[in-house]
Amino acid sequence: MFYDSWYLAKVLMDMNIQEVARRRERRRLLREAGIDKRGWLPRQGCWLLCQVGRLLVALGEQLQRYGQPGTLLLEGQGNGGYGENN
């Protein structure tokens, strides 16, 4: 029983090592061919752009609220400009 577990662990470890070697070789070949599939944006740049995007969405939502009819009423404009304050 112990032998089977040890053998299975060794086989799995060998398979993992082979997979890592295949991935490393594939990355090397892609890099040499100029087709590196890694992202063009570093992780910090991606985080920064996500934060800017969230800010833009929040500002856009505020602008939409201001642009909705009836949300921004100036004095005397609540009834078409005809009122007691006009």
Image (cartoon, rainbow, N blue to C red):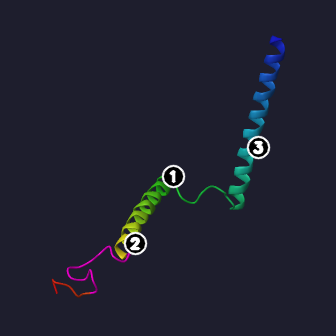
Tell me whether the residue at label 1 lies in contact with that at label 3, contact meaning CB atoms closer than 8 angstroms: no
Q: For this view, does 69 lie left or right of residue 84?
A: right
| Dominant secondary-structure state across the stretch colored magenta | loop
Disc number for residue 22: 3
Mark closer to the observer (1, 3): 1
Judging depth in this view, the residue of 72 and 6 nearest the camera is 72
Judging depth in this view, the residue of 78 and 48 nearest the camera is 78
Q: Secondary structure at mark 1?
A: helix
Question: Does the segment drawn in magenta span residue 37?
Answer: no
Q: For this view, does 74 lie left or right of residue 56?
A: left
Disc number for residue 11: none
Residue 67 coordinates in the image, percent (x, y): 37, 76
Whichever of labels 2 and 3 marks the residue nearer the N terminus, that label is 3
Whichever of labels 1 and 2 marks the residue nearer the N terminus, that label is 1
Cα separation, mark 1 vs mark 3, equals 25 Å
Which amino acid type corresponds to the residue marked 3 in the rendered image? Arg
Q: Residue beneath label 2, please?
A: 64
Residue 60 coordinates in the image, percent (x, y): 41, 69
Quadrant for the N terminus, please: top right
Indicate whether 28 appears above or below 84: above
Q: For this view, does 52 lie left or right of residue 14?
A: left
Which amino acid type corresponds to the residue marked 1 in the rendered image? Arg
Which amino acid type corresponds to the residue marked 2 in the rendered image? Gln
Looking at the rendering, which quadrant does residue 72 occupy?
bottom left
Mark closer to the observer (1, 2): 2
Read off the magenta span.
68-80
Q: Residue furthest front?
A: 84
Quadrant for the C terminus, please: bottom left
